[in-house]
Amino acid sequence: MEQPGTQVAVDAPPRGWDRAEVTLPVLAFLSLIGGQLPSFTTRANVYTICLGGSMVWLGLSGRVRRPIATRLGSGTAWWLVPIGIFGVFEGSTFLLGTPEYPTFSRLADPLLEDELVRSAGYLAWLTSFWALVRR
């Protein structure tokens, strides 16, 4: 039984601001700002929470949703296995807190000291989160 108002046209044209020519420069600009902030400071945390919160709000409001043409296959669930292993490993090393078993984020700290590398990482985070928001 279909519910009214939940159907989205597959061939709906994108909005003027919801095109790659607009969103990628905006995300690049936002990542340059985020890359200039020192890691784990109050300003950086507030900036990240505000950006993430606004993207979550946009995703939940349905304003930027794009229809999914096909459903994911049954083999897609196997991708959760390495993600789960990574999460268990990262969480256990964080809880242990010993220098013999550092977390991946602690291992990435020397790389993220450079503002350009930190901005590139921020851009990767923003674009992947934006792709998740639009699904």
Image: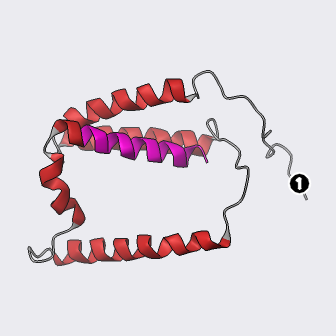
Q: How many marks on residues?
A: 1
- What residue type is disc 1 on? Glu
Q: Position of residue 71 (x, y in %)?
A: 71, 60
Please give left or right for residue 48 compared with residue 7 in the image: left
Give the quadrant of residue 46: top left
Give the quadrant of residue 34: top left
Q: Image height check: is 88 above or below 46? A: below
User: In the image, what residue occupies the spot 66% across and 72% down?
Assistant: 74
Tell which residue pokes out farthest to the top in this image. Answer: 16
Magenta stretch, main secondary structure class: helix
Q: Position of residue 18 (x, y in %)?
A: 58, 28
Q: Position of residue 114 (x, y in %)?
A: 14, 41
Q: Position of residue 30 (x, y in %)?
A: 35, 30
- Residue on which disc 1 sits: 2
Please give left or right for residue 44 compared with residue 83 in the image: left
Q: Which residues are magenta?
A: 118-135
